[in-house]
Amino acid sequence: MRCAHPVWPAAGPNVLDAAHALRAAQGGASALVIKTISTRPARVPKPCMARIGSDGLLNCELWSELPAEQYIEREYARAKSAGLPVIASIGYSAEELAELGPRVEATGCVDAIEFSLHYTGHGHETLVAAARALRGAVRLPIFAKLSPGMADIGGVAAALEPYVDGFAAVNSVGPAWAMNVEGGAALLGSEQGIGWLSGRPIKPVALRCVREVAQRVNKPVIGVGGIFSGSDAIEFIMAGARAVQVCTAAILRGPGIYGKIAREMAEWMDAHGCETLNDVRARGAAGVLSKSALDYEGRPPRIDHARCTRCGLCVTSCCPEALTLVGDGKKLLTLDEMRCVRCGLCRTVCPQGAIA
């Protein structure tokens, strides 16, 4: 599949049907992943989504509540009218995949099939059986969507690699739970209010999974989880991804987020002298190699006083109280190296990049 850039939707409410997929195309997506279907429509308890913080979602969403026949007979063809690659998402058991895969392929409107392993099981044999069943049933490229709760996710990917053409990593994180402290009730309508977490809070987990999978396989990896900006997407490319998928950001920010992320990626690449995504991945690999040796000593922070705005965020967050603002009037940020434990937090807290 050839795409103008590496930003796609991830299967979810943002691409519920063809109408939503076409809005994603108008918003700048370079390929269209459609919401997961299974052999029967899902019965989703309501409410099924709740905002967590500014950029997170807790959900008890399942696969599509629409029948598979509607996608096969109508939705994929309408989505294909956008002129972009269309990726169907299907689940979950080996039997369901073997049944649905050929029916989806027969539409002639789908360029690849992503199959979710979120509810398939945990044992390697069960997961491999699902991949083998779909591989034996279709000729289209197939991508396995991995879940972050898998023990040894890199090992799972390696076991699946002979049967698939690529991977999407990862699905939402959980089980998770939250409540309304005023009403004293769980936020979701599922049993016990249990759901799954997505969005920016899961990005570090997703990045670790992408890196682990990319290190174990030679097939392409698509990064998914908490991508809201071009720099977020660049992190996934540096971790080894070939493309990225976006769901929560599209729900919270609207379908224009796909094009925005792609433009920001291009701007970052121009600013950093990267002509291709391979250049970006190489920078990420070099950065990881430079951190390969354990460093128990660390170096004290260096302060760029020209950049420092004396906001005091680093002072507040410095547990050993090694950083202080001193002086009358225009105060100066100072460091007590004897107190400093070289934790590095100040470097990431500073909004001006004044600490290195």
Image (cartoon, rainbow, N blue to C red):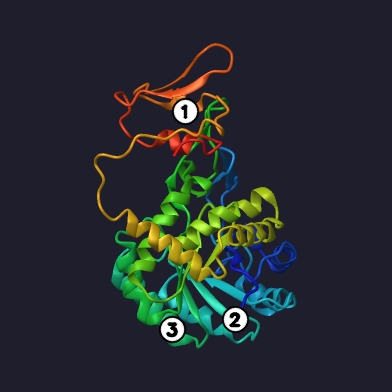
Closest to the observer, 136 or 54: 54
Q: Mark 2 = which residue?
A: 111
Q: Residue at x 61, y 62 (%)?
A: 270
Q: Residues within 10 Å of mark 3 (few under 14, many from 20)?
A: many
| Cα distance between the residues tagged 3 and 1 | 53 Å
| Cα distance between the residues tagged 3 and 2 | 15 Å
Q: Amino acid at mark 3?
A: Arg
The answer to whether the residue labelled 1 contacts the one labelled 2, judged by CB atoms less than 8 Å apart, is no
Q: Amino acid at mark 1?
A: Cys
Q: Residue at x 57, y 25 (%)?
A: 182
Q: Amino acid at mark 2?
A: Asp
x and y percent of residue 258 in the render?
66, 60
Residue lying furthest top in this view? 328
Closest to the observer, 103 or 21: 21
Q: Mark 3 = which residue?
A: 135
Q: Is residue 16 visible?
A: yes
x and y percent of residue 240 in the render?
44, 65
Q: Which mark is residue 314?
A: 1
Q: Is disc 1 placed on a helix, strand or loop?
A: helix
Residue 11 in the image: above or below residue 249: below
Closest to the observer, 169 or 14: 169
Residue 150 in the image: above or below residue 299: below
Q: N-terminal of the two: label 1 or label 2?
A: 2
Closest to the observer, 4 or 170: 4
Q: Is disc 3 placed on a helix, strand or loop?
A: helix
Q: N-terminal of the two: label 3 or label 1?
A: 3
x and y percent of residue 130 in the render?
39, 75
Residue 298 in the image: above or below residue 182: below
Left or right of 206, for residue 300: left
Of the two numbered discs 1 and 2 in the rendering, the one whose residue sits closer to the viewer? 1
